[in-house]
């Protein structure tokens, strides 16, 4: 027993100093691992959300956007995460029943509540922007326009989101924000690349926007918009033509053919065999044509088609004014337009019409495009209906006219040539986001929404490095001290000569 006690006393590993060193070493190792794990765990990304309602002339659509709470160069990196098409027509069509304009938004707003995280509802801004349909209604009947907006606001204020207001966008804003969308989605703004022009076509208006080296804004300043995005300045030419959306131009083309108040017209912009009874009052019920309604016209007329692209194009040309221009150069209706420059993205109705006609490939020569459209317009109406049984007739009957109008607008109106036509790309979406003005609008608004600091590691980098270094040095010292019991043995070993 005494021998065991003596051995224990002689064993250096059982001394209090060694035990203390071991305990401190274990604590230091645990501390080092804990600090490393906490400091290097993934930092959760914070996101913000925004909702924009696009109240167009023919329909309303809701878009949800998401972007990191910390921003790049003071501009949030916005991406579309969801879209919802409101059932029914545009809010301007509810002028006689304004409450229905608000009710029509209910289902899409309910979808938005499901898509945006609940904890973000109260801070998610909600905007409604109305375009040409409401511009026309406001021109025609401002009281009815106000009542529609009141109904819309009442419905949107009931949502859990941060409602920021509903307003009519100017044509200039619509064009400019469409340009921002196209270039943002194509990563041209962040990289400072050559920008893409934007061509937007709706039911009641059309916009053209692009940057030109030959335009500094001094000639026709009303068509100039300055942007600063991602540290770069852009001087943009933009113009919006009210009444030159495809639906309103169709009214103008029909008005051109019914000036004498006939009971029957033979329309080259509709297929052979097409026939429909149309009401004069309905045709002329728009500020774009209301002052042209013929006196003493019958209640209705028989609208018949004979499908001739060439004759249709002549009728379409008649709605443009190419004779007056007080500037160095014009597009049409006396509006200044600098020389076209760079590639262009054409979206909205441009895409939907040309996609239906299988004419989105602009590498096809322009003459070939016209030949294809000529054959399409000459196809009998009964055959067209058989070929497209799932397309609504009110859409199907207008594709010959709409295709002819698009080609005429681009080549005769905006001066695209056989060569520059190939610079146009018809687009629906870019990287999952719809092409249109809403994303540009949201992107611009993020400059006014305060940035939120991202979650950060518990320690600053310098502090983390200092703590790890101190603990590492402590462990080295402890390791050396833990070898202390071996020192006497090493010193007493005999030297071999």
Image (spheres, rainbow, N blue to C red):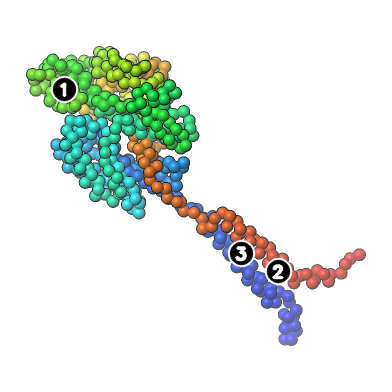
In the depicted structure, whether residue 59 falls above or below residue 360 = below
Q: Secondary structure at mark 3?
A: helix
Based on the displayed image, in which of its 4 quarters is residue 58 positioned?
Answer: top left
Q: Position of residue 331 (x, y in %)?
A: 33, 19
Q: The N terminus is located in which quarter?
A: bottom right
Report the side of 314 relative to 339 (left or right).
left
- Which residue is the site of mark 1? 291
Seen at 73% across and 75% down, the residue is: 12
Frontmost of labels 3 and 1 is 1
Instruction: Pick the residue in front: 338 or 65.
Output: 338
- Which residue is the site of mark 3? 29
- Which residue is the site of mark 2? 482
Based on the displayed image, in which of its 4 quarters is residue 218 positioned?
Answer: top left
Seen at 27% across and 47% down, the residue is: 110
CA gap, disc 3 to disc 1?
87 Å
Sequence-first disc among 1 and 2: 1
* Contact check, label 2 and label 3, Cβ < 8 Å: no
Q: Position of residue 5 (x, y in %)?
A: 72, 83
Residue 330 shows up from this direction: yes
Based on the displayed image, in which of its 4 quarters is residue 50 positioned?
Answer: top left
Q: Secondary structure at mark 2?
A: helix
Few, some or many residues within 10 Å of mark 2 (<14, 14–19, 20+) = some
């Amino acid at each position: 027993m005494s021998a065991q006690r003596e051995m224990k006393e002689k064993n250096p590993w059982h001394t209090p100093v060694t035990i203390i060193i071991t305990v401190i070493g274990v604590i230091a190792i645990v501390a080092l691992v804990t600090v490393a794990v906490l400091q290097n765990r993934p930092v959760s990304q914070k996101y913000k959300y925004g909702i924009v309602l696009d109240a167009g002339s023919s329909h309303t659509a809701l878009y949800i956007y998401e972007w990191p709470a910390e921003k790049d160069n003071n501009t949030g990196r916005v991406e579309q995460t969801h879209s919802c098409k409101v059932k029914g027509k545009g809010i301007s069509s509810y002028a006689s029943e304004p409450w229905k304009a608000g009710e029509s938004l209910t289902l899409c707003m309910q979808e938005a509540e499901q898509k945006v995280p609940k904890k973000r509802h109260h801070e998610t801004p909600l905007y409604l922007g109305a375009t040409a349909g409401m511009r026309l209604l406001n021109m025609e009947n401002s009281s009815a326009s106000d009542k529609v907006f009141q109904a819309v606001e009442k419905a949107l204020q009931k949502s859990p989101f941060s409602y920021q207001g509903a307003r009519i966008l100017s044509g200039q804003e619509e064009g400019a924000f469409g340009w921002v969308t196209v270039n943002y989605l194509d990563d041209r703004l962040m990289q400072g690349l050559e920008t893409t022009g934007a061509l937007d076509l709706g039911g009641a208006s059309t916009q053209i926007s692009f940057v030109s080296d030959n335009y500094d804004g001094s000639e026709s300043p009303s068509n100039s918009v300055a942007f600063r995005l991602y540290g770069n300045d852009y001087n943009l030419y933009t113009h919006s033509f009210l009444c030159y959306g495809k639906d309103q131009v169709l009214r103008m083309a029909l008005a051109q053919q019914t000036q004498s108040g006939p009971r029957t017209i033979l329309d080259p912009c509709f297929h052979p065999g097409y026939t429909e009874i149309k009401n004069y009052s309905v045709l002329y019920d728009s500020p774009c044509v209301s002052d042209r309604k013929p006196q003493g016209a019958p209640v209705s007329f028989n609208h018949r088609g004979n499908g001739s692209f060439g004759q249709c194009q002549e009728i379409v040309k008649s709605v443009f004014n190419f004779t007056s221009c007080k500037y160095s150069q014009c597009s049409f209706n006396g509006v200044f337009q600098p020389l076209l420059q760079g590639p262009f993205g054409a979206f909205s109705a441009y895409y939907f019409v040309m996609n239906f006609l299988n004419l989105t490939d602009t590498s096809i020569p322009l003459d070939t495009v016209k030949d294809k459209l000529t054959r399409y317009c000459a196809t009998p109406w009964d055959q067209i209906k058989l070929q497209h049984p799932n397309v609504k007739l009110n859409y199907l009957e207008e594709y010959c006219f709409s295709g002819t109008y698009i080609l005429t607008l681009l080549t005769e109106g905006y001066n695209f040539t056989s060569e520059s036509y190939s610079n146009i790309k018809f687009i629906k979406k870019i990287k999952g986001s719809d092409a249109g003005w809403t994303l540009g609008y949201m992107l611009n608004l993020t400059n006014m929404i305060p940035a939120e600091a991202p979650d950060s590691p518990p320690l600053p980098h310098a502090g983390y490095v200092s703590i790890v270094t101190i603990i590492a040095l402590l462990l080295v010292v402890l390791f050396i001290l833990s070898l202390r019991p071996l020192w006497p043995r090493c010193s007493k070993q005999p030297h071999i000569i």
